[in-house]
Image (cartoon, coloured by chain):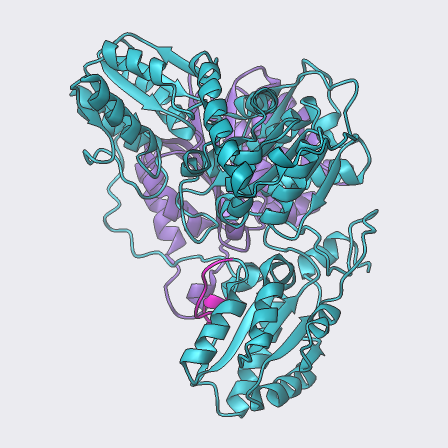
Chain colours: A purple, B cyan
Amino acid sequence: MDTKKILFTGVGGQGTLLASRLLGEAVMAAGMDVRVSEVHGMAQRGGVVESTVMIGGLKSPIISKGEADILVSFEPLETIRALDRCSKKTTIITNITPIIPITVKLGQGEYPDVDHWLDFMKSNYKRVCALDAEELAKEAGTAKAVNVVLLGVLVGLSELPVDKEMMEETIKTRVKPKFVDANLKAFELGLSQVES
Amino acid sequence: MHPLLSKNSGEKMLLLGNEAIVRGAIEAGAAVAAAYPGTPSSEIANNLFFISLQGDWPLYFEFSTNEKVAMEVAASAAAAGVRSLTCMKHVGMNVASDVLMTLAYVGVKAGMVIVTADDPSMHSSQNEQDNRIYAKFANLPMLEPTSPQEAKEMTIEAFELSEALELPVIVRTTTRTSHVRGPVELGPLPETVKQKGAFQKDPRRWVPVPAVARMRHKVLLDQMEKAKEFVEGSRFNTKTGQGKLGIVASGVSACYVEDAISELGVADKVTFLKLGFPYPFPRKLLEGFLADVDKVLVVEELEPFLEDELKIICKETGRDIPVLGKASGHFSRMYEFDPLMVKKAIAEVLGVEVPMTEAPDLSSLPPLPMRPPSLCQGCPHRETYNAVKEALKELGQEENAIYPTDIGCYTLGLLPPIQMADYLLCMGSSVGSSSGFSIATDHKIVSFIGDSTFFHSGLSSLASAYHNEHKFCLVVLDNSTTAMTGHQPNPGIEIRPAGYDRPRIPIEDAVRGLGIKNVYKVNPYKKKEAVDVFKEVLAKDELSVVIAEAPCILYYRKVGGKK
């Protein structure tokens, strides 16, 4: 079976860990082997939070330079930071809403030109899907569902052995009951980004 | 019902390595567990805590004030015939090591498992010490899982081994085995759990005065000889392939090796020895392995633990083949590995090409701004730091001040714009190091410690500081929880998880109880009052303690703002 190495990246508090866990649960429910790695501890205080989902019998929990099959990024600066983990064959899904780091606010660095780098990605990588996931999450009823919007896009691209129904089933069983409806809506909105 | 108890035997769950250890302990009938939290071990303790708190299972759990106490609690329970577990991060083992070294001599009756979670690359730690060396140092058996499934199975095995050998058994993980999720097939839960034992008096065993200790050291060595029989036949030590390059690995490194062999397509060229039960070293297994190959590559993070032993065996058996690894420069003694690094090393030794993916040219990428972790918006620690800074400024002492700090969220006070963390060693070091600075300098010393860290190892240092007349201001950042590791309780907390009703020790009472008179409490959100208190305290040149009391905002929200 084909292996897939999926890298999730974002900022502490954005829900990257929940996204990778939901995907891992859906893959396991589909009867495949999966490893999900997570970052806990200090980085969760507003630092960069990375997680991976490794599908198809891979044992390694992390992804080296140039080896991600799919990058799912919650924040554009973090997308750019993770480009060295990608190759020309990588599919990139990225949220476009910046979260300005404290270092930029203190004048210790410059936030990169997002539009320029999105153009670069579009002309250099296999497939790029850039969207305002926060806007869609708000439309679904909660700005916190950025992670599930991005999962919708990921499943919509049909590069993984997980379909819409499996993912919806996982959301229903894994998300807190009062947030299920908003998350299902967010998932649909993510899916529709690919279809349109 | 706690999620780890909610599914039936035979079902699969996607568990963290740490959760799998908890499930393993439950399946093995552990009835007592004690721990002090620390990344990457914390989820073990958290899950045990909630299982115990909810009363879902006959398990006693406590957050002890530090790792030493936790190990003592678990050790005596096991001495009394009750299966027990303690878990800690790698540096926590240093705190518990005083117990560990002698516990190995006196041993246990029921199974006792010690989990140490190491942190190569220091994702959340102050050093990256390799705790496999503790297994050798204390002379205790050690298992090393590569996946959550193995983490569960090895925990169960560790209890069995421990009971058979009457020695505690170490399960060693790293960040990449503790914090990895994978499918875990659940086993049956025991029908009964032995919660009470009886301590059989035997001073010639349990009281290691010199005459007893001399006997017990011999017993330890004898028991570890017996352990070799278990290790030689262990199902966790596996050999695959018949190629002439021997590869030895354990822990997450074994995962990288497995993927590398498959991705490089070199299965016919290598013999791969995966050591899930590496200590005591399986001497016969290793000798047989060395006889079958003509070169060895050892893939292990941090210290050359297996590499050095293989070299010893080569020397002693006259087997003159290259043992490659750290000393040969194929791998570093620093930081964690990654899959490509391991693939490249194996390819180099075999003289094959690494199939590389083609990457776009990123040379035009500008330097990207860093995104360091920081104190949360609205965190009370920020307010305390600002109040201290303001007071020092008004006293004209800002330039002369130094800030010994401690371990917790507030260590992030290191970063701009606060920059009030000047010296740090370990848990509780703020107090002892302030004492040294007060002897050796004329700086104005303001040190910071959290409430949980204060109970962990601040108390005895503070007694020492007062008795020896050191002069500094200790600020206790009391946010009523152990925030950094996921909001565990400590003896001082006012805000509590539902159902947690153990007695409270107010920090102020504890400090006054030591005899210290200059004790003040401030609310960091009341800036003017806080600055006034700090000004009054810092104008004097004597030992003082200021308790800055305000709950962690994340925790306050989580528990619904209830006290």
Q: Quadrant of residue B283?
A: top left
The image shows residue B551 at horizontal and vertical percentages of 71, 64
For the point 61% across and 34% down, which residue is it?
B204
User: If the image is split into quadrants, where does the C terminus of chain B sit?
Assistant: bottom right
Left or right, residue B557 beside residue B145: right
Residue B13 can be seen, yes or no: yes
Q: Nearer the viewer, residue B293 or B348?
A: B293
Tell me, yes or no, whether the highlighted magenta stretch contains residue B265: no
Left or right, residue B78 beside residue A68: right
- Please, is residue B134 above or below residue B312 in the view? below
For the point 50% across and 63% down, which residue is it?
B429
For the point 37% across and 57% down, which residue is it?
A112
The image shows residue B342 at horizontal and vertical percentages of 30, 29
The image shows residue B304 at horizontal and vertical percentages of 30, 35
Q: What secondary structure is the magenta-colored segment mainly?
A: loop
What's drawn in magenta, residue-wise?
Answer: B413-426
Tell me, yes or no, whether the highlighted magenta stretch contains residue B424: yes
Q: Given the current orientation, which residue lies at the most extreme front position?
A: B211
The image shows residue B296 at horizontal and vertical percentages of 23, 21
For the point 37% across and 64% down, which residue is it?
A109
Q: Quadrant of residue B285?
A: top left
User: If the image is split into quadrants, where does the N terminus of chain B sit?
Assistant: top right
Q: Nearer the viewer, residue B78 or B424?
A: B78
- Please, is residue B465 above or below residue B406 in the view? below
Q: Nearer the viewer, residue A38 or B110?
A: B110
Q: Nearer the viewer, residue B135 or A102?
A: B135
